[in-house]
Image: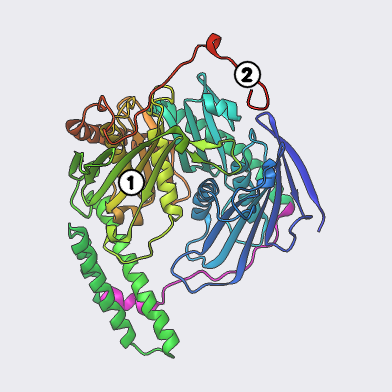
């Protein structure tokens, strides 16, 4: 294989791509140099499809501490479990890539990004997303890319693509956006109460830069791409479809409109189990085939359920629980539930309920950071916990998974924008979000509960923050935008668009979609509808607690600041106790 090397200028920095020399046994391998940041991205797929009802994609982002000239912390002094930053970056890469594989593709795919060298001013995260897309596109794996991402910051009123560390620290808006040439398909943002219109401007500027990166990738693909492997896409057996359509489909559709979550899910589960039994009675070649067809009966019944949810919303403009498209579920806010903690609040939205507890500590209790970023410690921590009982299930309990880490980071980003400075409030701050019930939008409920628990603890936040999750159902050229989505609408819908902010503006965004992309028109409408919902939620929260407490809890540590005039400081250097 001939080595390929080519460079491009991208907004004042140099991107160099190498192919054909390193990691040649991987399905696809790309070395990306972004100034002094160097990332190896590989993509490899299994030759045969897995017998699963989902697409088995794994995305890894490996931080090698030598990349930043560091020796890892801990007793072993070697890289171990992925840091929170590495986990969040892997999710960031996964989310825009996953929708671009064909429906029914079941071959296992593993994407590995290894950071060899890091220049803090040249994002290794965006280089990894760029490299992951290219590794897939030049490999033998069928993939409907390319896809790319950039960071957009607004510094002193000017929008900057892939800002330096210094620029990011000065920015009032930090947006990570990914997509294809045609449309945006992933968003992450933190902002200091910026308007919806300014956020839309940043999204458009980001998408323009993404198009440039996609053009670069197309040039590389034309020169380096391998022939794609032949794959068999997963399909449901026609016999199974016919039986479910005849004996169960209509009853499943009727069950979708049961308003209570547990009653609805219970009835649908009962009907699906009945369809599995009916399929098992049919004649099959052997037990292995019968087991496979029973599994397909389950899958197709779920597909019938999903199609009915989408039909109700797109055609009848009715949601499974009977709400209008822009209607919130019933709200309830409470504070001071726990007597000895520093601050507590309970926020309930329909069948989603979160208890937030705020704890204050000395600045020395800030979290120590050991990763490739320039951050060494974190004064504010928002941690999200999702036990299985919150959805009426039995499951593993232990260290937080990727989803919990991701939801915690989103809440932390939303609330951090309104916290007082260290000089104004010299405390380390931790909010713990305990999800007690969940039927969609628990991450946004954790933001609402977190705001109130901070206020109850006496943290002088600058404004109240509330969050709401928006959904989308697209059918042909028509679409319906949903406010405050529940679990079923999230699972079977096309978008999960979380918007958090104050009355003045947005503090955090997160968007994931299952379609290939969405338009500016849909984004604009979704943001406007989210603003309306956010105002209703803030009204409810303010009726419970309208301002931060003037004093911190009597159980919280008390901090006194002592200032010593410079002319009073005397330094004595001696030895022997002198």
Q: Which mark's residue is nearer the viewer, 1 or 2? A: 2
In this picture, residue 506 sits left or right of residue 185: left
Which of the 4 image quadrants contains residue 497? top left
Tell me what residue is drawn at x 28 percent, y 57 percent. Answer: 390
Q: Residue furthest right?
A: 2
Q: Find residue 205 and report its horizontal and vertical position in percent.
A: 53, 30
Distance CA(mark 1)–CA(mark 2): 49 Å
Tell me what residue is drawn at x 22 percent, y 45 percent. Answer: 348
Q: Is residue 546 visible?
A: yes
Tell me what residue is drawn at x 49 percent, y 32 percent. Answer: 174
Residue 395 part of the magenta segment: no
Callout 2 secondary element:
loop
Q: Which residue is mark 2?
A: 572
The image's mark for residue 287 is none
Q: Which residue is mark 1?
A: 433
Tell me what residue is drawn at x 42 percent, y 40 percent. Answer: 381
Q: What is the magenta range?
A: 224-246
Q: Find residue 154 and report its horizontal and vertical position in percent.
A: 51, 25
Which of the 4 image quadrants contains residue 428? top left
In this picture, residue 105 sits left or right of residue 280: right
In front of the other: 89 or 312: 89
Tell me the quadrant of the picture where the C terminus can be found: top right
Callout 1 secondary element:
strand
């Amino acid at each position: 294989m001939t080595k390929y090397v080519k460079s491009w200028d991208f907004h004042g920095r140099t991107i160099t791509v190498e192919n054909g020399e390193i990691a040649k046994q991987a399905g696809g391998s790309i070395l990306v140099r972004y100034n002094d940041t160097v990332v190896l991205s590989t993509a490899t797929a299994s030759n045969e499809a897995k017998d699963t009802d989902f697409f088995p994609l794994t995305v890894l982002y490996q931080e090698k501490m030598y990349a930043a000239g560091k020796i890892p912390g801990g007793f072993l002094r070697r890289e171990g479990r992925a840091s929170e930053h590495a986990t969040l970056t892997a999710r960031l890469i996964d989310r825009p890539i996953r929708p671009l594989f064909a429906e029914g593709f079941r071959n296992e795919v593993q994407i590995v990004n290894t950071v060899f060298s890091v220049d803090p001013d040249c994002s290794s995260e965006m280089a990894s997303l760029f490299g992951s897309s290219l590794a897939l596109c030049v490999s033998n794996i069928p993939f409907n890319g390319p896809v790319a991402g950039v960071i957009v910051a607004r510094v002193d009123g000017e929008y900057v693509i892939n800002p330096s560390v210094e620029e990011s620290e000065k920015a009032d808006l930090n947006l990570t956006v990914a997509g294809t040439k045609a449309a945006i398909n992933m968003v992450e943002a933190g902002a200091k109460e910026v308007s919806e219109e300014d956020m839309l401007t940043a999204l458009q500027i980001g998408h323009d830069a993404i198009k440039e990166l996609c053009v670069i990738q197309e040039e590389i693909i034309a020169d380096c791409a391998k022939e794609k492997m032949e794959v068999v896409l997963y399909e449901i057996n026609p016999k199974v479809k016919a039986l479910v359509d005849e004996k169960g489909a209509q009853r499943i559709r009727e069950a979708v409109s049961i308003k209570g979550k547990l009653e609805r899910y219970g009835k649908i589960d009962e009907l699906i189990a009945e369809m599995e039994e009916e399929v098992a009675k049919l004649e099959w070649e052997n037990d292995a085939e019968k087991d496979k067809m029973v599994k397909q009966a389950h899958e197709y019944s779920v597909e019938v359920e999903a199609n009915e949810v989408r039909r109700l919303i797109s055609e009848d403009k009715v949601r499974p629980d009977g709400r209008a498209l822009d209607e919130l579920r019933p709200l309830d806010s409470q504070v001071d539930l726990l007597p000895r903690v520093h601050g507590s609040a309970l926020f309930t939205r329909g069948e989603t309920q979160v208890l937030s507890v705020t704890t204050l500590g000395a600045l020395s209790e800030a979290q120590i950071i050991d990763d490739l970023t320039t951050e060494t410690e974190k004064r504010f921590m928002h941690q999200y916990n999702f036990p299985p009982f919150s959805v009426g299930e039995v499951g593993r309990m232990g260290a937080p998974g990727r989803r919990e880490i991701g939801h915690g980071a989103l809440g932390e980003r939303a609330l951090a924008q309104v916290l007082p400075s260290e000089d104004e409030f010299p405390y380390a701050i931790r909010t713990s979000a305990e999800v007690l019930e969940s039927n969609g939008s628990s991450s946004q409920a954790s933001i609402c509960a977190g705001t109130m628990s901070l206020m109850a603890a006496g943290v002088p936040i600058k404004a109240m923050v509330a969050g709401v999750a928006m959904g989308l159902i697209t059918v042909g050229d028509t679409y319906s935008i949903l406010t405050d989505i529940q679990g079923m609408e999230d699972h079977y819908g096309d978008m999960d668009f979380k918007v958090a902010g104050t009355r003045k503006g947005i503090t955090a965004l997160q968007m994931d979609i299952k379609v290939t992309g969405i338009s500016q028109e849909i984004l604009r409408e979704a943001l406007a509808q989210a603003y309306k919902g956010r105002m209703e939620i803030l009204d409810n929260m303010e009726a419970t607690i309208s301002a931060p407490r003037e004093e911190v809890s009597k159980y919280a540590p008390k901090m006194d600041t002592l200032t010593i005039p410079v002319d009073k400081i005397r330094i004595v250097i001696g030895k022997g106790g002198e």
